[in-house]
Amino acid sequence: MQVKNRLAIIMAEKGIKSISELVRIFEQHDKKIARRTLDRFYHNENNQIHYDTIADLCEVLDCEISELFVLTKEN
């Protein structure tokens, strides 16, 4: 099994068109996150992610952790 994130889907549902726009939304919430971190997360290229980053993503995107991640079968 593999953990995947649904960031791209959540962004689309909320009308967020780009990582740059998401970075600006983070800044509006007085949160800091590196664009590279969001890029890697968006493309499911992370091997790990800090709990604080997950909490910030959920807060900024107004979603639950269970909406952000799914468990999939490996191919």
Image (spheres, rainbow, N blue to C red):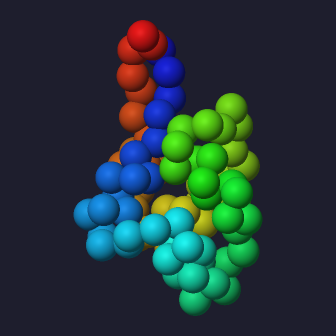
The residue that appears at 50% across and 77% down in the rendered structure is 21
Residue 38 at least partly seen: yes
Instruction: From this view, report whether residue 51 is shown above or below residue 29.
Output: above
Q: Is residue 59 among what the camera can see?
A: no
Left or right position of 51 against 1: right
Quadrant in the rendering for residue 36:
bottom right
Q: Position of residue 73 (x, y in %)?
A: 39, 14
Residue 11 screen position, x and y as percent: 37, 63
Q: Residue at x 52, y 43 (%)?
A: 43
62 or 17: nearer the viewer:
17
Where the C terminus falls, by quadrant? Answer: top left
**Residue 53 occupies which quadrant of the picture?**
bottom right
Q: Nearer the viewer, residue 57 or 39?
A: 39
Residue located at (38% from left, 70% from top): 17
Q: Residue at x 30, y 70 (%)?
A: 14
Q: Is residue 70 above or below residue 40?
A: above
User: For this rendering, which residue is in front, 18 or 49?
Assistant: 18
Left/right placement of residue 23 relative to residue 71 reads right
